[in-house]
């Protein structure tokens, strides 16, 4: 999971990109990068850490131009410790290209081999973003003529990317001297939206971003979500060109965006993330009612922040008191996306503090958005008991995560997943709860899609069914052998 943004403006974009990345910070705290386009010149600044600490005044002054892109990252491919893998990536031919990417490619072995043997392109990292950039560059080299680059040639290159690349990818690239191109994979797994506004002189300005909240906050009008396989090319002067991929497409967005990754004030694929989380709470409440004695629950408490809407709705549905029992330190990163089990475990108590008076002598139902590795849940249950809870029940607004997620979320091996080879009761024992309730898969699907025309989601981490149809047991075994924390 990463956050990406691109701006085509009529004024310098450095501050606009910085502000947009602050809004997308929840999507990754490992590193960040900005690139701007000043005519034929590309300027870049990349750094480890969060946006607010990464850029200095001299960095911002160096980012000249009215067109640019930005990225916040947490590592799902390659290494979180290697500064060479911080996005955006740059290649000098053809034209000069710089690219950011949210997602994961699943045919990296085949692509790397073809780029080296056939395309004669050198890769300097293990990042699949560098792979994607070089595939785009090679396709652009093949489609471009001797004259000025045309939108049709740009789109032919993107179509070539779609034919060669497997997995999930929402991407934005700058082409030196020409403008910005953005595209979404043919399954629409990772999100991408387009926004528009006019300046005081009536000139067009555009933004492309991972989440709609960026569009709202900067005063743009949401034009639409990118369709699966769709590409747009926006010239330096703000002229928009659109292209629909003529190959096979289908919309199957990642369910985990709605469960955890996206901010609740975003709308994805026409669906409010906040409303989805409320419906998740309603459906979870019905299962809690079936499986737990309600007269033995004194209070419902959320694990902040993602689970708050679900917990509130669950409490209201069941007529149970709702309390905030944990105080969150907002200056510590989200533990789920922190690299390394030891770092995640240590950070839980830095991030959360239990309010003892809310727990003392009470039978508490804790509601979290999901249980992935179990480390955070185990620490939280222990904190609740230490704070004086008489009993600690636990409910997950998502189903049990039993399978690797290979489309851009940092849970690629079954060995890391607490529920992968355990029953619900065994997971309960691991996290130390008195009872444990997971959302049903069908209920999560309904919570996201009810009232919409959407017929498919990527729910592979819950079901083991991978929407691209190209993820094999051999690939998963290879991924586990080559896992980097």
Image (cartoon, grey):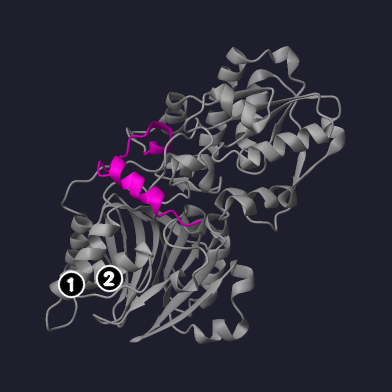
Q: Report the residue marked by disc 1.
A: 119
Task: Please state if 81 lies on the left or on the right of 144 as rendered.
Answer: right
Residue 283 placement (x, y as % from top left): 53, 23
Tell me if residue 243 can be seen.
no
Snapshot quadrant of residue 130: bottom left
Residue 370 placement (x, y as % from top left): 56, 36
Snapshot quadrant of residue 304: top right
Residues shaded magenta: 458-485
Comparing 405 with 4, the one in front is 405
Q: Report the residue marked by disc 2.
A: 134
The answer to whether the residues at label 2 and label 1 have Cβ atoms under 8 Å apart is yes
Task: Please state if 96 lies on the left or on the right of 307 as rendered.
Answer: left
Rendered view: 333 above or below 365: below
Snapshot quadrant of residue 460: top left
Secondary structure of residue under mark 2: helix
Rendered view: 82 above or below 325: below
Which mark sits nearer the N-terminus, 2 or 1?
A: 1
Comparing 57 with 439, the one in front is 439
Distance, label 2 to label 1, CA atoms, is 9 Å
Residue at 47% in and 70% down: 86
Residue 435 placement (x, y as % from top left): 65, 22
Tell which residue pokes out farthest to the left in this image: 146
């Amino acid at each position: 999971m990463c956050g990406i943004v691109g701006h085509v403006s009529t004024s310098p974009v450095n501050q606009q990109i910085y502000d947009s990345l602050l809004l997308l910070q929840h999507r990754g705290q490992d590193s960040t990068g900005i690139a701007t386009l000043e005519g034929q010149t590309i300027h870049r600044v990349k750094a480890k850490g969060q946006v607010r600490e990464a850029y200095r005044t001299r960095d911002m002054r160096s980012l000249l131009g009215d067109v640019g892109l930005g990225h916040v990252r947490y590592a799902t491919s390659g290494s979180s410790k290697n500064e060479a893998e911080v996005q955006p990536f740059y290649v000098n031919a053809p034209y000069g290209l710089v690219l950011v990417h949210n997602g994961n490619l699943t045919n990296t072995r085949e692509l790397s081999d073809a780029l080296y043997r056939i395309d004669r392109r050198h890769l300097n990292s293990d990042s699949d973003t560098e792979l994607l950039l070089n595939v785009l560059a090679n396709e652009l080299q093949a489609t471009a003529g001797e004259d000025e680059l045309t939108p049709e040639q740009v789109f032919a290159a993107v179509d070539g990317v779609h034919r060669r690349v497997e997995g999930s990818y929402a991407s934005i690239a700058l082409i030196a001297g020409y403008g910005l191109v953005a595209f979404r994979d043919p399954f629409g797994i990772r999100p991408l939206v387009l926004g528009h506004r006019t300046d005081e002189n009536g000139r067009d300005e555009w933004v492309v971003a991972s989440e709609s909240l960026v569009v709202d906050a900067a005063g743009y009008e949401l034009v639409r979500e990118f369709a699966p396989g769709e590409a747009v090319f926006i010239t330096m002067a703000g002229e928009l060109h659109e292209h629909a991929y003529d190959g096979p497409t289908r919309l199957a967005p990642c369910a985990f965006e709605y469960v955890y990754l996206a901010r609740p004030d975003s709308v994805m694929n026409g669906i409010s993330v906040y409303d989805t989380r409320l419906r998740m709470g309603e459906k979870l409440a019905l299962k809690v009612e079936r499986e737990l004695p309600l007269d033995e629950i004194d209070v419902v408490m959320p694990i902040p922040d993602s689970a708050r809407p679900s917990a509130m709705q669950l409490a209201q549905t069941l007529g149970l008191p709702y309390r905030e029992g944990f105080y969150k330190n907002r200056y510590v990163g989200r533990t789920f996306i922190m690299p390394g089990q030891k770092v995640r475990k240590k950070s839980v108590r830095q991030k959360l503090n239990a309010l003892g008076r809310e727990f003392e002598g009470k039978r508490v139902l804790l509601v979290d958005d999901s249980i992935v590795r179990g480390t955070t849940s185990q620490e939280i249950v222990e904190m609740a008991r230490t704070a004086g809870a008489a009993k600690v029940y636990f409910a997950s607004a998502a189903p049990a995560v039993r399978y690797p997620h290979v489309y851009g979320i940092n849970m690629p091996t079954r060995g890391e997943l607490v529920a992968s080879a355990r029953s619900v009761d065994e997971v309960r024992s691991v996290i130390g709860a008195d009872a444990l309730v997971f959302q049903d898969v069908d209920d999560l699907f309904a919570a996201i899609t009810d009232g919409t025309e959407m017929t498919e989601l990527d729910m592979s981490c819950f079901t083991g069914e991978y929407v691209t149809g190209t993820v094999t047991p051999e690939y998963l075994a290879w991924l586990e052998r080559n896992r980097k924390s």
